[in-house]
Image (cartoon, grey):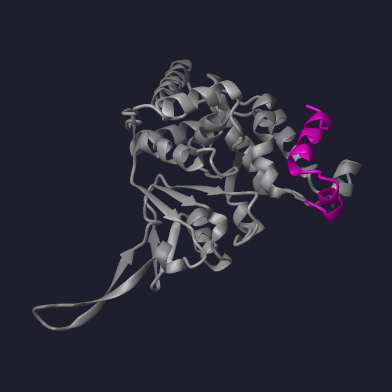
Amino acid sequence: MSESNESEILSNIKNARERISAELSKVIIGQEEIIEQMIVGLMARGHTLLTGVPGLGKTLLVKSIAETFSLSFKRIQFTPDLMPADILGTEVVEEDKTTGKRHFRFVQGPIFANMVLADEINRTPPKTQAALLEAMGERQVTAAGQTFELEPPFFVLATQNPIELEGTYPLPEAQLDRFLLNVVMDYLPQADEIRMVTETTAIQNETPQPVFSAEEILDIQNWVRQVPVSEHVVSYAVRLASATRPSVDSSPDFIKDQIKWGAGSRASQALILAGKARALLNGRYAVAIEDVQALAVPVLRHRMIPNFHAEAEGITSDSVIQRLLETIKK
């Protein structure tokens, strides 16, 4: 690719980031790192899981991001009585008024949208959670004996509450692995919280305006795929993901002592793909090891399972990943 094309792409991405930030700042206070990770997920054509305690504005953030895109948007509130058909759609019987004959017609469910908010995804049983699996992995839906393609771009942005255990159903590992990133939303710094409380308790008229079309998003996703990455950076990403696996002889001792299952090969792919998106967002047309390191925690945290001893000692996936970043040589 020529330097002029690279310069044009970087300029377009910079403009895109500024437009998104300007619109989101109308309703979202702070959370810059969280917003960057969410945008990385969208640019990389990946699904994102947003985890955080109640009252942090997870749903508001996802809805605000959706409002900055000229895309079809559906929200699914996951509840214990939600059925797969409530997500995918169902067949209904219709009667032809002229002939009197009856026939079946498939009515599409809310999964048939460009951007789907799966709110509190861990509040619905595994059978219904699994209904999302094919849609997320294959970007298609099989229902009523037919296969329906989901119109691109297609994203699932899911939220979950990590502290309430009663009435919740933890996502199975196979479905967790379908999420490119697991973004954890934490409490605002006090200064940002003061500003948030001040602004949200006054008259509020501004809402985010659409700034992107589906075609523009698809262009950005294609640009991300074209970003070059050196063999050295790919090797680092693979070594980092491999080091999370206790069954690998070269894994550090603390991994073998604290981790039950490590990240699969999809994690290596996710590290590079997300790294490409982050490089573009930061005005670079090449992936650096720093991009991989910056996204290691949201890429790997949901793909690692601490063992019983680690959980008993309060050791989390996040702390293990931070220790890995200090251990694995660049």
Horizontal relation, residue 319 to residue 223: left or right: right
Residue 131: x %, y % from top left? 50, 63
Front-most of 215 and 22?
Answer: 22
Q: Position of residue 168 (x, y in %)?
A: 60, 60
Q: Residue at x 46, y 36 (%)?
A: 221
Whether residue 237 is in magenta: the answer is no
Point 33% across, 46% down: residue:
72
Q: In which quarter of the image is the C terminus?
A: top right
Q: Nearer the viewer, residue 311 or 166?
A: 166
Q: What residue span does the magenta drawing correspond to?
A: 306-330
Q: In this view, does 251 lie above or below 211?
A: below
Q: Position of residue 14 (x, y in %)?
A: 45, 20
Inspect the magenta stretch and tell me whether residue 317 lies in it: yes
Question: Is 146 or 101 nearer to us in this picture?
Answer: 101
Picture quarter containing residue 316?
Answer: top right
The answer to whether residue 103 is visible is yes
In the depicted structure, whether residue 73 falls above or below residue 221: below
Horizontally, residue 19 falls left or right of residue 196, namely left
- The image quadrant that residue 207 belongs to is top left
Residue 86, image x and y in percent?
41, 65
Q: Residue at x 78, y 44 (%)?
A: 244
Res 248 seen here: no
